[in-house]
Every structure is written in structure tokens, then in C-alpha cells.
């Protein structure tokens, strides 16, 4: 796989959703429709920056993260991967952009990633996660813990 293209034009208020599975265009249409639904009891407009470029097909995290981490305002990226496309409800993979280098020390990093560096979330949960992480209201580790406590390992927006 070659180098992934840069992601221009994302507004800091837009959740970043990267499509990495290209086997089912109908499923992708369903995912994008769900992500564009108003959220927070319909009170908020959905703001999403979609990356829908076959150059990202089957891209592994170790190639995705360096590209998305160029955006210093981004604390989480959401992937529409094979699981997203093939699972009922289309749960996206939420991945933190936090690196060990950004933490005070190894103990700080371990605490912030106690429940992992990724979890699944419903499309409705994407906006809740992105918005709260963007303003520092909640941390990635809190959402990861909620997903960890869920029977299916998923964060579900209330």
C-alpha cells in the first residue's frame, strides 16, 4: 500500500470519519445517512468530515494515525471498516490520536489508555464522543470504559 493522501479542509468542529472498507456501497450510504442525522435529542446539526477515497481501502491503523494526527485539533478518528459495514447498526471504530509522547510519563499514558486506544460506537455516539473530547468535557478513557462495560463492547449515546 502506498502513502495515504492528506486530509484537507476538515473544520475543527467536524467529526472525522474515514471509510476503509469498499465492498458494500449500500452499507456506506446507510452509515453516512445515520451519521448525518441530528443528534442530542435532535437539538444539534451533525457535522462530519467524510474521507471516502479508495486510497484508504484496508489501510491499517499504523498508516492511518500519522496522517490524521497532523491535525492537532483532532483527538479521535472514526473508522468505517469491515465490521462497520457488515454489522447491524453499523458501529464505527473510535480510535484515540493520543500518543505516549504526549503524556507526562508512562503511568499517565497507561491510565489514559486503561481500557484501550479504540472502541466501537453507534453512529449516534460519534457526535457525542467527538464534541465532548473536542471541548475537554470528557476524556477518551471515559468513553472507552463505558464501551468496555457494555455487553457488546460498544459506546451507545444516551
Image: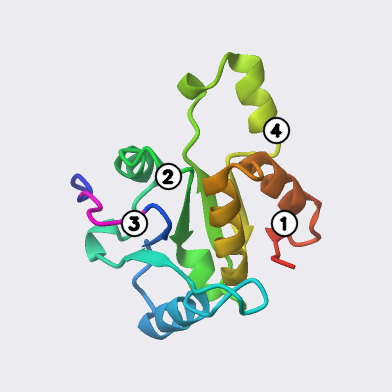
Residue 93 at x, y percent in the picture: 54, 57
Spatial separation of the CA atoms under disc 3 and disc 4: 30 Å
- Label 4 belongs to which residue? 114
Image vertical order of residue 77 relative to residue 69, above or below: below
**Residue to which mark 2 is pinned:** 74
Label 1 residue SS: loop
- Where is residue 128? Give x, y as percent: 61, 60
Label 2, label 1: how many angstroms apart (C-alpha)?
23 Å
Alpha-carbon span between mark 3 and mark 1: 30 Å
Query: Residue, x 70% and y 39% (percent of image)?
Result: 115
Q: Is residue 17 left or right of residue 3?
A: right
- What is the CA distance from the residue labelled 4 to the residue labelled 2? 20 Å
Q: Mark 2, mark 1: which one is toward the viewer?
A: 2
Quarter of the image holding residue 14?
Answer: bottom left
Q: Which residue is mark 3?
A: 11
What's the CA distance linking mark 3 and mark 2? 10 Å
Which span of residues is magenta-colored? 6-11
Amino acid at each position: 500500500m502506498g502513502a495515504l493522501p492528506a486530509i484537507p479542509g476538515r473544520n475543527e468542529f467536524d467529526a472525522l470519519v474515514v471509510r476503509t472498507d469498499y465492498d458494500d456501497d449500500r452499507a456506506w450510504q446507510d452509515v453516512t445517512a445515520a451519521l448525518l442525522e441530528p443528534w442530542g435529542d435532535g437539538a444539534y446539526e451533525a457535522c462530519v468530515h467524510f474521507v471516502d477515497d479508495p486510497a484508504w481501502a484496508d489501510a491499517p491503523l499504523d498508516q492511518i494515525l500519522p496522517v490524521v494526527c497532523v491535525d492537532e485539533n483532532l483527538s479521535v478518528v472514526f473508522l468505517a471498516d469491515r465490521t462497520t459495514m457488515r454489522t447491524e447498526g453499523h458501529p464505527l471504530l473510535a480510535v484515540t490520536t493520543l500518543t505516549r509522547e504526549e503524556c507526562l510519563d508512562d503511568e499517565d499514558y497507561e491510565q489514559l489508555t486503561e481500557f484501550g486506544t479504540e472502541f466501537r460506537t453507534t453512529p449516534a455516539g460519534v457526535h457525542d464522543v467527538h464534541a465532548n473530547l473536542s471541548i475537554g468535557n470528557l476524556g477518551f478513557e471515559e468513553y472507552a470504559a463505558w464501551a468496555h462495560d457494555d455487553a457488546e463492547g460498544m459506546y451507545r449515546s444516551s
